[in-house]
Amino acid sequence: MASATDLEIPLRISEIFFSLQGEASRVGLPTVFVRLTGCPLRCSWCDTAHAFTGGQSMTLGAILARVAEFPTRQVCVTGGEPLAQKACLDLLRALCDRGYDVSLETSGALDVSQVDPRVSRIVDLKAPDSGEAERNRWENLACLGPRDELKIIIASRADYEWARARLAEHELDRRCPVLLSPAQGRVEPRDLAEWILADGLPVRFQLQLHKLLWGNIPGR
């Protein structure tokens, strides 16, 4: 458990809210989202630019108290890029110590090896049309196991072909589940679904459930 001193560790928080998980294997589960402020990437299709700056400073203890107000054991730590704040590791550990089922959504550009092993890591691979493909930290792949997941957002047919090649090159589906999502307004979901079926890719197609329900509303 976090010590009294640890509970005073500050983090910059964009928002904490209660909603349905919209992505990955936990889709549909009532979840508390802890969104940390800041991100070193600028993906072309980013839908959380409001988390790049601002937010408020909260102690680890205050964050834990806020999370405890909601009726669920599911917690997702996200951003921005949560690992850009070193104290994110302390937050993840403290949540696990309190018995939460914790997932981390991360860009894949930063080291995930120090993340508490009880956390499920949802790691992006940035395809070329994101504008940030050179930031992929390929060393992270060796850290991933069956409890983790890889997510690739597809913004064009070229992105899809890149993802298909990386899937084969690195045998990604043997490491952990692989998720392919269409970038909103850039690729028709039906097109991506048909490409996956035509090639028989061992991936999971996903749409963002929260956007289908509530649109692009921050905090949902």
Image: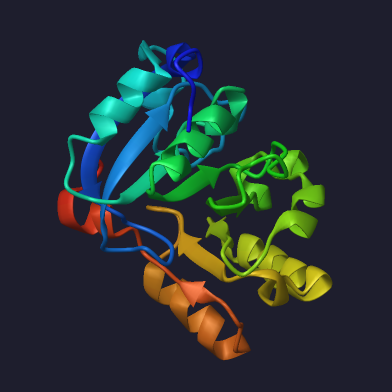
Q: Position of residue 63 (x, y in %)?
A: 34, 25
Q: Position of residue 48 (x, y in %)?
A: 40, 33
- Does residue 59 appear in the picture of this structure? yes
| Residue positioned 67% across, 39% down in the render | 132
Quadrant assignment for the C terminus: top left
Image-quadrant location for residue 166: bottom right
Compared to 126, does 4 lie above or below? above
Image-quadrant location for residue 142: bottom right
Compared to 96, does 178 lie above or below? below
Left or right of residue 146, residue 54 in this image: left
Q: Position of residue 61 (x, y in %)?
A: 36, 20
Q: Nearer the viewer, residue 62 or 143?
A: 62
Number of marks in the rendered image? 0
Left or right of residue 203, residue 209 in this image: left
| Residue positioned 50% across, 45% down in the render | 105
Type of colouring: rainbow
Q: Position of residue 70 (x, y in %)?
A: 18, 41
Q: Nearer the viewer, residue 196 or 21?
A: 21
- Does residue 220 appear in the picture of this structure? no
| Residue positioned 61% across, 83% down in the render | 201
